[in-house]
Image (cartoon, rainbow, N blue to C red):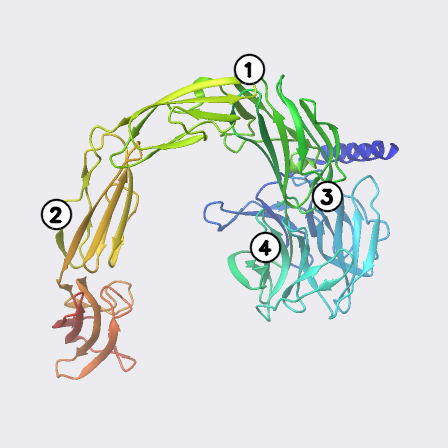
Amino acid sequence: MWWKAAIAVIFVVVLATSELQGQPFPCDRNMYMAVTPAVGQTTQLRTWTLNPVTGEPVFNPFVVELNVVVNALGYSVIDGHLYGLDPLNGNLYRISSTGSVTDLGVPNGLDMQYEYYAGELAPNGQNIILIGRTRDTKVDRVMYSIGLLGTTYNAGYVSIVCDWAPSIGDIAFNPVFGILVGFDNATRRLVDVSTGGNITGTLQGSNSQLNMGSLFYDEQGRLFGYGSTGGPETQLYQINTSNGQVSTAGSWVSGRFTDGCGCPYRLAFEKTVEPAATLPCTEVTYRYEILSTAGIPYSQAELKDTFPVGFEIVSVSGLSSLSVIESGAGSRILHIRKVQTLLDLNVIEVVVRVGALTGTYASQATLGPFPNALGNTLLSDDPGQPGVPQPTPLHIIGAVDLIADTLLFLCQGSLRNIEANPTASSYQWNTGETTGHITVSSPGVYTLTAIGPCGEYVDSIEIKSVLEPLWVDLGPDRAVLAGDETVLQGSTNATTDLLFEWSAQGDTVMSCSDCPHPLVAPSSTTIYALSVTDENGCTASDTLQIDLLPALRIYAPNAFSPNSDGINDVFYIQGKGGRSIDRLRIFDRWGNEVFDKTEGQLNDPNFSWNGYHRGKPASEGVYLYVASLTLSDGRQVVVSGDLNLFR
């Protein structure tokens, strides 16, 4: 097994070297961009990220001067450093989070008749992929792969095969699907790039002037690019990978050349058990879910788990034929080698027979090793437990917990379900029923006898009728003036917290549908309905009709000053109760019409007079406005008044 020892030595060399050269970059939401402001200047390293709440880009003003020229940037999941290449001289650089740059020299076999602007590290961190472009015609001709493990860096290449003359600005690996994509600046579109050198494209370009120097994937598989539609690169774009369309996401620093990368790769490891509560000596199923958006499959991980004393593994399923079970059925120790971790969701299920003693038993599995940036050895997490990765608890119950509740209430005129733990072999209720759950319609004591592998269990529950039916009252129907708001309030006999559910039939605005007192603004006669539910599951409901009273409250200023100072520059009509302004006309004092506009709304500054007539400023003086409005009930009215124009 000499090759295992050799790989171990390589990893030690790489990690030891990285420790000497500075701290690694974390594998998080940060995106890294190498910016060369102008020809003849050295490269700056900048970072940006996406706001996790709004999704908007957040640009970090901090700048790291690298004092070298770097493009073809990529992130290594092995040592957490950035690697890049001088596009013209071919020097390979390793960059730490402290800004220190290590010159690794020109890789052996790298042909310097080409220039290298587009590049990316493979998702496993073992090699960097480069695209070689001819210096005279600027056409991509070769694709290089440079190995990064060890102390020497050797380059191998394949010729690019493409139906056109490509000029790729940057490339990036999709963490969800593992495919390599590039943005072709020759055809202004997103293309597929195989590591065998084939470049294909079926998507249409969205802008005939667009150039991209940088590509970034985030952990959700969303693609971003940095470029411009002419001149220096200054714009961040989001690229729809389904149709190739590009939308602007933000503006940032200017660069003659840019190149980007990030660490979008993630592994999530969860462990659950079903059922979470069981009788002694029964069987449960532990489910291990490995969600991989790591950009590449992994096949050498080991899954280990140790169950409590008295537990015994019955079966293991969901494994690849290449996986090896070192310990499984017949033992309480689970050990699987060569776990195949493919992209997307991987599921392994283990059936376990639990022990004979009641209590809560927690266990936690490990999975690994993976590259350091992905967590190396992962601890399983129970998604139902808060905080950092938590063990998965299992409750072995006795007779007292056979029925979860001891007392339930029966709502008037309704039925009540009684559920028992589902792991018994047989059930016998004092009603004669033999299922794990029953439905009752009357109060009383209900007793269950259940038989499990380790014995017989007896439990009971009391069902009581509620003393007073639940009710809710929204009060008498009422009316409001058109344009007004009102708060809905109901009274109830409930003494505990309620769940509220509001609905409406009519044209209305409602501030919330699950709160006690929503604010509403009906624009027509509306019926509001409220349904409440108490802790016993009892429900009550009521309705309220609000009629709309027509009202017109108009405010039209008697003066305005269209002098472009941002204050009272336009004349428009404000108010409540009007559905629309059918027509607004302005006349001078001699009766000449100077403004006429139709089909507008109240309170809309865009439906206004700006003090101009036939393209020229109107004279100061007194004018007359005449407005035809339609009220909320459909009636039409005309309002008018004097208007003073000052400059």
Which residue is denoted by mark 4 in the rendering?
Answer: 223
**Quadrant of the rendered image containing residue 566:** bottom left
Residue 357 image label: 1
Q: Position of residue 534 (x, y in %)?
A: 28, 34
Q: Distance between the residues labelled 2 and 4?
A: 56 Å
Instruction: Look at label 4 and name its amino acid.
Output: Leu
Q: Which of marks 4 and 1 is nearer the N terminus?
A: 4
Residue extending farthest front: 432
Label 1 to label 3: alpha-carbon separation: 48 Å
Q: Point out which mark residue 449 bears.
A: none
Point out the frontmost of discs 3 and 2: 2
Instruction: Label 4, secondary structure: give it.
Output: strand
Q: Distance between the residues labelled 3 and 2?
A: 71 Å
The kind of residue tagged 2 is Pro
Residue type highlighted by circle 1:
Leu
Relative vertical location of residue 272 with respect to residue 67 in this rendering, above or below: above
Q: Nearer the viewer, mark 1 or mark 2?
A: 1
Mark 3 is on which residue type?
A: Gly
604 and 181: which is toward the camera: 181
| Residue mark closest to the camera, 2 vs 4 | 2
Q: Is residue 402 above or below residue 599?
A: above
> Answer yes or no: do the residues labelled 4 and 1 have beta carbons within 8 Å?
no
Residue at position x 67%, y 57% in the image: 181
Check disc 2 and report its element: helix, strand or loop: loop
Horizontal and vertical percent for residue 276? 51, 28
- Residue at point 58%, 61% (across, down): 242
Query: Which is in the foreground here, disc 4 or disc 1?
Result: 1
Look at the image and tell me in which quarter the N terminus lies. Answer: top right
